[in-house]
Image (spheres, rainbow, N blue to C red):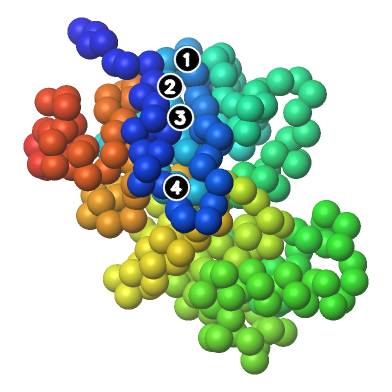
Amino acid sequence: MSIAIPASISISALNTQSTSTAGTTPTAGPIIEIQSLNLYYSEFHALKNVGMRIDPKSITAFIGPSGCGKSTLLRTLNRMNDMTKGVRINGKVAISGTNIYDTDVNVELLRKNVGMVFQQPNPFPKSIYDNIAYGPRIHGITRKSELDDIVEKSLRSAALWDEVKDYMKKSAYGLSGGQQQRLCIARALAVNPTILLMDEPTSALDPISTLKIEELIQELKDQYTIVIVTHNMQQAARVSGQTAFFLNGEVVEYAETVNLFSNPADQRTEDYITGRFG
Ligand SMILES: Nc1ncnc2c1ncn2[C@@H]1O[C@H](COP(=O)(O)OP(=O)(O)OP(=O)(O)O)[C@@H](O)[C@H]1O
Ligand SMILES: [Mg+2]
């Protein structure tokens, strides 16, 4: 049972007008380009011929039932699957025009450029300050005034500064779950990435913290390209400009979020978003 799936839909072609903002130069092309991507966990074919183009400074949501490959695809975007035994990948993932699976790619630099936030907030067992300064220090920044600036800027960008500015030396473990997640976002921002990957970043949070993170994601779009995996379809509809619906490792449909939810092109998308399965 195989149904023809368009290898890739040019989102850039679809929304040049909606994404170009007055005063900024129009984008030259996709920042992420996935072509004919296949991923195997040993014998198991987890991603099947995935193709996708993602514009800079956009928010893309990955949706689909449990086990369909959302996290797997997200992890291919900064080579987090490299660490998993038995993984084989073929096809292409280009970021800013560079195939990140080329042998000469510096994976550390790639992960600096493509940050990641996980489902469970995972601060380090360190102070709030040291959580944020950790990445910049690894990348060679030692001057205190420079670190102070980065810490403040990152915490402001993650909408956390006002809540923590007087407690910088306190353990990050003393923060609430929602604050910890914003701290993890600040930590990712501190090394100046261009892309932020978020794997169900609010699924462990209460509704108010969830709303705060959603607002934050919207604000971050002005500066970063965001890809978010979510099980919450309202969340996908609220925050994203484009949505990809996955099933059994395939992209069934990839479209502007408003279109995908209001007028899905594929029956399987419609069945999923209307709650008929998954
Ligand atoms: N390390 C691994 N080794 C073997 N199989 C794996 C591994 N990680 C994931 N898989 C399998 O690959 C498929 C896709 O998994 P993935 O975690 O990407 O799904 P997902 O869409 O993120 O699901 P969920 O919504 O539950 O997080 C599943 O069948 C899963 O069991
Ligand atoms: Mg997952």
- Which quadrant of the view contains residue 62? top left
Considering the numbered disc 4 on the image, is that residue within a helix, a strand or a loop?
A: loop
Residue 12 visible in the displayed image: yes
Q: Which residue is mark 3?
A: 53
Q: Are marks 2 and 4 in contact (CB under 8 Å)?
A: no
**Amino acid on which the number 1 mark rests in the picture:** Ser
Q: Which residue is mark 2?
A: 51
> Which residue lies at the image location 44% right of the left edge and 47% below the top edge?
20
Sequence-first disc among 1 and 2: 1
Considering the numbered disc 1 on the image, is that residue within a helix, a strand or a loop?
A: strand
Dot 1: within a 10 Å radius of its alpha carbon, few (fewer than 14), some, or many (20 or more) residues?
A: some
Q: Quick check: 224 above or below 52?
A: below
Q: Is mark 4 within 8 Å of ligand 1?
A: no
Q: Is mark 2 within 8 Å of ligand 1?
A: no
Left-right relation of 198 to 132: left
Q: Are marks 1 and 2 in contact (CB under 8 Å)?
A: yes
